[in-house]
Image: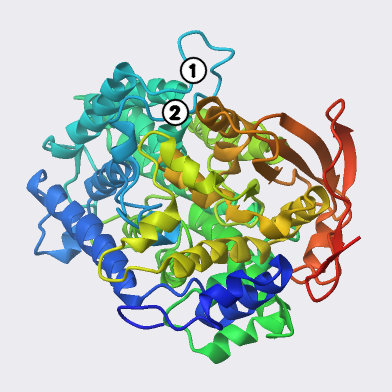
Amino acid sequence: MGFFAPEPEPMAPDELIALPVRERLRILNTAWVKDGFNTPRMLHMVYIVKMLGLYFALGLAITAWTSSTVEFTDPMSWFTQIVTYQKLAVWLMFLEVVGLAGAFGPLCGHFAPMLGNIRYWVRPGTIRMAPWGRRLPGTGGDERTVGDVLLYLVVLASLLYPLIVSAVPVTAVPDGTDPQELIPAYTFIPILIAMPLMGLRDKVIFLAARSEQYLPIFLWSAILGAVALSDGATSSDFVNLVIVFKVIIVVVWVGAGVSKFGQHFLMVIPPMISNSPGQPYAVKKAHYRDAPNDIRPSRIAWFMAHVAGTAVEIVVPLVLLFVANSVVALIAAIIIVGFHLFITSTFPLAVPLEWNVFFGFIAIVLWGGVSGGFDAATYSIWHFQNAWILVPVFALALVGPVIGNLRPDLISFLPSMRQYAGNWASAVWAMRPGIEERLNELPLVENQVDQLQRMALTPYTRDEADVTQQKAVGWRSMHSQGRGVLSALFEHLDDIEDRTLREGEFMCNTIVGWNFGDGHMHDERLIASIQKRLDLKPGDLVVAYCESQATPWKYDTPQHYRVIDAALGVVERGTWQVADCVKEQPWLPNGPIPLDVRWTAPGFVRRSTLTSSADGTAVR
């Protein structure tokens, strides 16, 4: 890829668009092997500056300004003060809610402007998504009100409060630990109230804040922090707080690792490696069996997924949780830092870069054993006083992953801790000509093809912008669920060659302002909100949607899908076998995978029984 412009596409955009869908996918899939999303390196520099400057450097500066024990010019103090952990967590949640952290910019479908989140959420009339609007009084509807905007501003203010308040000294710390400070416990109370209320009105904002990651930190900072700051506190009270912070992070790591069991995660690694701007082509190609002819994952990809990935993400955090040896803890922490640096280097779509910086940095803070800091021999779970307190700590931390994996339809993949596991609720939209343009009638929405044509420094032509959007569909098809939802569309539509295909997550970003891979944000509820405003005709917008596969991730555990017509609602429900998805090439050269139809809306008849030949030509 070039610095200011992407590498040339494998063929002229107008010629590529004219190809049958499956042949077009084949070319996009094989091009992804070498160039990934083909983002100009200039944009990677934007992400790096934002990650290291806006988040890390400014976050540490704020910490130093509000603490007497952290010096911005003394890096050693960054690693020995627990207040650094607290301040960076608050700062990151603030940036997430504003839209300047994960899900920012072109790798998440925000092209011009690159900022979503706050632009939508301070505008009355934009679409919001209440999680239980039909069941909980006072939360119904799908339109943002002035009251919603005011509540969102309260959320921002409640995050700024603990961020700018000066830290206060801890009453007692163990011998060998430098004097410590904490954010005053009471300053967390406003966000612990405001964010759940915001979530009841709009789950998008609640999830965008990564509440499942940071609210537990704030909750225990308020409860155990108050104990550690009280007049009669002992050093054990401070040790308890640090250990709880460790437990929270370990559950995130292990939960994410467990979610990678099954057949999905192996499909994540090759396209993720291919999107890394720093990887040589030989390394990228090695992750596929025989690119460009066979781009299913290779044995190297299997090793990266299940040894360097899943095993490390489970075993190393468990070692960190139970280790009481400083040397072992340091080695394990360094491995975790390498793990997060690797993820960051791939610039994954949805770009959770700041999150990876935070978790890598904090691994050294909590387990690095820096002199005067938190030695594992003192701050291990074996030294936790009043062990009964760990019961609610673990219960709160595990409720999301346990329920979310058993019933993925009930809980977002974020509190389920399935980040980048490949087992995602997903969708692909199929629109008749002109429908994508009509999305611009929605409040504050501008479709991404239009955005790309006016992107500063690197404006795209109409056809180039179209191809860029279709790359996202190609990326989705390189994962297991993408082959399933595309199969459903091929089975349903006799005019699929004339339709505009778009990846659901990218579309969701333009309509509600944010998405981080959660298909629940663009299921039939969002489609109904669009229909309410645009009054589309039957067949104008057809969405193939699938739910995450439920535990125990066995080969014969089906994955559920549904087909949604904007004007008609859900018209079909069924399942497919994940094993059928992973054995096929992304462009489905052997035709759609088998679908087990379990319900059809009364009176509904599929528009098509078409299949396609290997060259992408539709036949009966």
The quadrant holding residue 405 is top right
Of the pair 126 and 582, the residue shown nearer to us = 126
Q: Are marks 1 and 2 in contact (CB under 8 Å)?
A: yes
Which corner quadrant holds the N terminus? bottom left
**Under tag 1, what secondary structure?**
loop
Q: Residue at x 43, y 45 (%)?
A: 510
Q: Which mark is residue 566?
A: none
The image quarter containing residue 575 is top right
| Residue 108 position in % (x across, y down) | 44, 56
Does residue 485 appear in the picture of this structure? yes
Residue 430: image location, x then y, percent = 65, 49
Image x and y of residue 254, in percent: 57, 52
Q: Tell me if residue 365 comes above or below residue 201 in the rendering.
A: below
- Which residue: 33% across, 68% down? 459
Q: Is residue 524 left or right of residue 415?
A: right
> Which amino acid does the dot numbered 2 rest on?
Arg
Does 264 sit left or right of 610 as displayed?
A: left
Does residue 231 sit above or below 319 in this rendering?
Answer: above
Q: CA distance from mark 1 to mark 2?
A: 8 Å
Q: How many neighbours does mark 2 have within 10 angstroms: few (below 14), some (14-19), or many (20 or more)? A: many
Give the label on residue 141, or none.
Answer: 1
**In this view, 145 is above or below 82:** above
* Secondary structure of the residue carrying numbered label 2: loop
Give me the disc on residue 128.
2
Residue located 54% across and 28% down the image: 529
419 or 348: which is nearer to us? 348
Q: Amino acid at mark 1?
A: Gly
- Looking at marks 1 and 2 on the same chain, the residue that comes earlier in the sequence is marked by 2
